[in-house]
Image (spheres, rainbow, N blue to C red):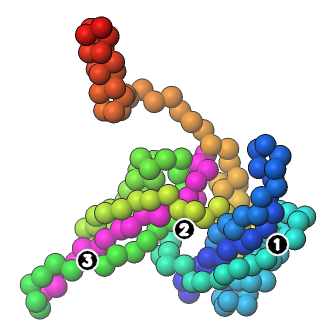
Amino acid sequence: MSATWYECKVKYRKTDETGLQKVVTEPYLVDALSYTEAESRINEEIAAYTSEEFKITNIKVANFAEIHPFENTDRWFKSKVSLLAYDEESGKERKTNMYLLIQANDIREAYDNTIHVMKGTMGDYTIPAIAESPILDVFPYFSGEEGAVEALERFNAIKASKPFVAEQKEISIEAELEAELETELEETI
């Protein structure tokens, strides 16, 4: 049985870096069997994070086929993957789109992580779009059966791991162009 993911928007008072309190509405993702269970689970999860009063403003079914956390990452990205299939009857190529929620530090890493996830796919596919998702956290459902506890601990460990920002050895094209423009500007002065 595949998971049904619900996007839950929660409104609460949050203290920002400057110490000011601000009312925010933030989306979270929970794995549940129904809207009622999704509401119950998000209440339980958010109550553990905040002592402030909060309100659930919206619950809707999310259109994610799969959720993939990665270690040392801190943001979620929505990857659109188009599966390509050849229809023998009509002789045309057909595309079927699916969306993956991938954890990464930036777009490039999200692309690499999407490629890693799709590595075992037998058919052809393309990745036409990747965008940062506003989702702050993901709460999967684990039944408590044997093996599920280890899976929950592994998922939470991956999700909670600190981001590791490696030094980039490559210089981006934009940085190179900027350096060239600065050099030309200095030469003209």
Task: Give the amino acid type for the residue marked by disc 3 in the picture.
Answer: Lys
Q: Residue furthest right?
A: 51
Residue pictured at 66% horizontal, 56% vertical: 159
Task: Give the amino acid type for the residue marked by disc 1 in the picture.
Answer: Phe
Quarter of the image where one finds residue 72: top right
Task: Report the side of 36 relative to 134 (left or right).
Answer: right
Q: Earlier in the sequence, mark 1 or mark 2?
A: 1
Which residue is denoted by mark 2 in the rendering?
A: 67
Residue 144 inside the magenta-drawn segment: no
Question: CA gap, disc 2 to disc 3?
Answer: 21 Å
Instruction: Give the label, 1 or 2, closer to the camera.
Output: 1
Say what secondary structure mark 1 lies in: strand
Q: Earlier in the sequence, mark 2 or mark 3?
A: 2
Residue 54, label in figure = 1
Give the x, y percent position of residue 15: 81, 53
Question: CA gap, disc 1 to disc 3?
Answer: 42 Å
Tell me where the magenta segment starts and ends, as one range. 67-88
Residue 95, label in figure = 3
Q: From this view, report whether residue 176 is shown above or below residue 147.
A: above
Residue pictured at 54% horizontal, 79% vertical: 62
